[in-house]
Image (spheres, coloured by chain):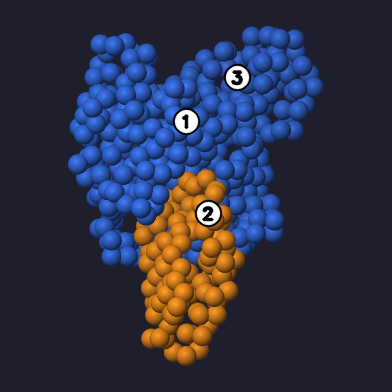
Chain colours: A blue, B orange
Amino acid sequence: MIARASVRRRRLRGCCLVPPYVLEHLAQYGDAAQRRRAIGTLAVDHSLRFGRAQFASLLALRPAGAQDILATLAAGIPRRTIYDAHSGENLGEATVVRTEGSSPVSDDAVNEAYDNLGSTHAYYWQVHHRNSIDDRGLALNAYVHFGRDYDNAMWDGQRMLFGDGDGVILTHLTRALEVVGHELAHGVTQYTAALAYQEQSGSLSESVSDVFGSLVKQFTLQQSVTEADWLIGADCLGPGVKGRALRSMAEPGAAYTDMLGQKDPQPAHMHDYVSTTADNGGVHVNSGIPNHAFFLIATTLGGNAWEKAGRIWYETIRDPRLRPTIGFQTFAATTVRVAVHLYGPSSSEVSAVRDGWQQVGIQA
Amino acid sequence: MRIRVERSGGFAGLVRTAEVDTATLPEAHAREIEDRVRGIDFEGGARLSGEAEARPDAFQYDVSIDDGDTQHRVTLREPALPAGFREVFRRLLELG
């Protein structure tokens, strides 16, 4: 598709060379080729305030043959609404505080949620050509200041809920881009692999969310695999924690040394798999194993993690043969099959994928 | 009354435990906690929690209560928490 080619070219150039008002003029009055390029560029840069009002007026013009381009334009734009839950848990009493295309407000939590939702949407669109969580433009609604001292952020199936944290263990829950990416990735999993949230399939669900959360951050900051910190939640640790982050994909088990008397419990290898009934079978603990496999594979492949490793992982969760209750071994085997399909059976990519899983104790 | 609540899950994966024996509390606090706990529909919450699909990054609460001759052992999960439970947990963390 034309817009996708424009996405790649723009990404390489890096910045917006043509001012938005010129692009909009070309989109309406240029010749066919100029219109295509202008609309493609506008579709890519979600940070331009090309909101729904302008889109609607463009739609009214309807130049011949531009229908699919206009659809692409819509797909590149998120539809965000941020609500303030006023420290309550009744969503019906929340108030709208920021809508798509509107200016920043005085509440940092609102702006952070807004920006991080936008960055996550942009990642899925620009890297995977996925139109929001359901690939059909699902509106992104987030509620900030949910509950009192609520030490959590979650995607509840339809919306993001952000607590404020208790200020000691967790704080500024809207601030960490990879946390927002993690939560929205649960939504993507819901619409693709639908991994059952317990035991190994649940640990895979958690790991997939950490992987894509980290990729959203790396892509937004344009970090290579060596520049990335591979940490989850560094920005929301409170002063009561001794450590760098909630989780480390590079070094599972070393993210923190003291959080309420506990150290980071994550294993990096199947030998140390934790059997427990808490946390739905330790889904936040055993996710360390597939997390580490992804880290090893991405760093072996080098460059930008989203280009090959991220692509393999994305195609894996979309594989129709995946069942909701799969374990680590089947998931690993699927990543190998996807890599074979994308890069060929004797490729260095396939070797890297197999080796990564082997190093964490899984024969793929 | 002896109450133990272990909260796990949440995106941070942190385990927090609140454990209180009301016999060791001042009279007023003991009465307050016992009244609140007795007013919670644990069995209803457990049933709803068991029926609903586990939501990613939701909190899980493993509750164990010894109230003289009755005992409860239930697992509760967001968002199917019975009314009043969150407040009780916060209070137990404060007192325990």
Q: What is the three-letter code of the residue carrying label 3?
A: Gly
Q: Which residue is mark 3?
A: A40
**Residue that extends furthest to the front in the rendered view of this protein:** B69
- In this picture, residue A187 sits left or right of residue A311: right
Q: Which residue is mark 2?
A: B49
Q: Could you tell me if the residues under marks 1 and 3 are in contact, i.e. CB atoms within 8 Å?
A: no
Q: Quadrant of the N terminus of chain A?
A: top right
Q: Chain of mark 3?
A: A
Circle nearer the N terminus (1, 3): 3
Q: CA distance from mark 1 to mark 2?
A: 23 Å
Secondary structure under tag 1 reads loop
Q: Residue at x 54, y 75 (%)?
A: B38
Image depth: mark 3 or mark 2 in front: 2
Q: What is the three-letter code of the residue carrying label 1?
A: Ala
- Please provide percent x and percent y for residue A270: 23, 39
- Please provide percent x and percent y for residue A330: 34, 28
Check chain identity for marks 3 and 2: say if they share one: no
Q: CA distance from mark 3 to mark 2?
A: 47 Å
Q: Which residue is mark 1?
A: A193
- Please provide percent x and percent y for residue B93: 42, 72
Secondary structure under tag 3 reads helix
Q: Quadrant of the C terminus of chain A?
A: top left
Residue B5 visible in the displayed image: yes
